[in-house]
Image (cartoon, rainbow, N blue to C red):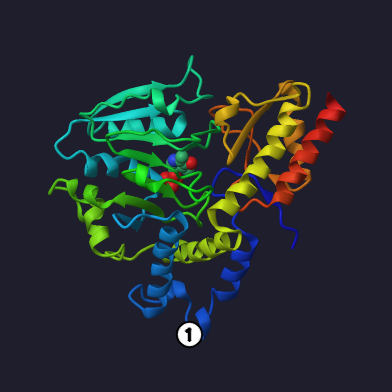
């Protein structure tokens, strides 16, 4: 089988080794005569997988003891409303940094439940930079400050995080486990699976224990973090398949040298592409400020926009898929999450150079 390079923003590429292992184990799980996906989620077999994921996340991210790791459904999108519903407590406002498309969506849901103070909302109408963490002045009266660690569509990534007296809540859907992380600086971290963790269907939440009990009584059981924390995320049937796949992805990351190893690899991959973009005499342009360029989603435009379709067509003929930018911002985007191999990025960099030379 000729495996193509998947530069889609999500669902995104998974490590080939993980897919092969899942294929091998899918029908008969470890000689049990059943597939894991048809085995009870209360069984010993599933229990091992479930806790290997919770403990694997704790170990990779060095999660302090006063935090819980939860495995939920509903995607990152459910967290947009679950967070304000759970964390407001006796407060009535929340703070937001609006850094792009995903932050806007999170903000829209938060506004249904709370007053929202927007501390920063792009620069000159563009989401191509970030505020300096030290310049942010969160309101002491707000329940939390929400940020988006990596804007998947705009290609903007926080390199350092705000220090804040109120809890920082971060949507890390598109860069979780791509680099080491100071978990103790956050009140809550959340991430949908389908960028860096697993196939879609499971959402990871890391929450500081003192924030679990703030939810009002009148909130459905599933919507309360406490429900899941009390039951080790086995309150109801968990999304077995993505959690199982995640157990393999976590081992794969360990094999790459953990988060330090992965970060180094991700930096090399990102440098290859930004290097080409910055060294082709303006043939390509990345609109994002250099110090906050994403190592996960590299956005760029071609100076001559008329060449873009030809560029994308040539890429797909070379088995490189998913390079068209999001319809809301246009241009091109190469999503190079953890599982995108260096060779894939090298192939793209070579093609970009060749295309610029031919058409420049
Ligand atoms: C993809 C993405 C989401 C949405 O995730 P779902 O799991 O589809 O709900 C939210 N935030 C960011 C930053 C994303 O990249």
Q: Is mark 1 within 8 Å of ligand 1?
A: no
In the image, is residue 246 above or below residue 98? below
Query: Is 339 rendered above or below residue 34?
Result: above
Residue 319 shows up from this direction: yes
Quadrant position of the N terminus in the picture:
bottom right
Q: Residue 140: horizontal and vertical position, in percent?
A: 23, 28
Quarter where residue 57 is shown: bottom left
Which residue is at a point 18% across and 50% down the rendered structure image?
213
Q: Based on the displayed image, in which of its 4 quarters is residue 164 positioned? A: top left
Q: 265 or 80: nearer the eye?
A: 265
Residue 69: percent from the left, percent from the top?
35, 57
Q: Residue at x 52, y 51 (%)?
A: 196
Circle count: 1
Question: Which quadrant is home to the C terminus?
Answer: top right
Q: Is residue 78 visible?
A: no
Residue shown at 50%/51% (left/top)?
Answer: 177
Percent x, y of residue 320: 72, 45
Quarter of the image holding residue 279? top right
Q: In the rendered image, which residue does mark 1 sit on?
A: 32
């Amino acid at each position: 089988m000729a495996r193509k390079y998947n530069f889609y923003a999500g669902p995104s590429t998974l490590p080939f080794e993980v897919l092969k292992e899942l294929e091998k184990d899918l029908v008969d799980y470890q000689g049990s005569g059943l597939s894991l996906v048809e085995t009870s989620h209360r069984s010993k077999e599933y229990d091992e997988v479930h806790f290997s994921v919770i403990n694997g996340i704790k170990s990779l991210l060095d999660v302090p003891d006063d935090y819980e790791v939860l495995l939920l459904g509903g995607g990152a999108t459910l967290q947009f409303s679950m967070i304000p519903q759970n964390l407001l407590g006796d407060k009535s406002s929340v703070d937001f940094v609006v850094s792009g498309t995903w932050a806007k969506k999170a903000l829209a849901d938060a506004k249904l439940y709370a007053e929202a103070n927007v501390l920063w909302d792009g620069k000159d109408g563009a989401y191509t930079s970030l505020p300096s963490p030290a310049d942010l002045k969160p309101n002491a009266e707000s329940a939390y400050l929400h940020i988006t660690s990596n804007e998947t569509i705009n290609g903007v990534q926080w390199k350092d995080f705000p220090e804040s007296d109120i809890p920082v809540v971060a949507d890390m859907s598109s860069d979780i486990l791509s680099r080491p992380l100071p978990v103790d600086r956050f009140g809550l971290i959340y991430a949908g699976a389908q960028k860096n963790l697993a196939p879609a269907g499971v959402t990871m939440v890391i929450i500081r224990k003192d924030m679990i009990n703030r939810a009002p009584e009148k909130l459905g059981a599933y919507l309360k973090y406490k429900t899941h924390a009390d039951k080790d995320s086995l309150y109801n049937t968990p999304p077995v398949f993505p959690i199982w796949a995640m157990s393999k992805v976590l081992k794969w990351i360990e094999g790459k040298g953990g988060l330090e190893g992965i970060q180094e690899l991700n930096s090399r991959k990102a440098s290859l592409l930004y290097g080409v973009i910055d060294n082709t005499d303006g043939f390509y342009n990345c609109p994002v400020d250099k110090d906050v360029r994403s190592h996960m989603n590299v956005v760029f435009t071609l100076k001559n926009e008329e060449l873009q379709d030809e560029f994308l067509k040539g890429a797909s003929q070379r088995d490189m898929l998913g390079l068209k930018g999001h319809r809301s911002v246009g241009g091109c985007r190469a999503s190079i999450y953890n599982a995108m191999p260096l060779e894939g990025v090298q192939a793209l960099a070579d093609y970009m150079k060749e295309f610029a030379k031919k058409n420049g």
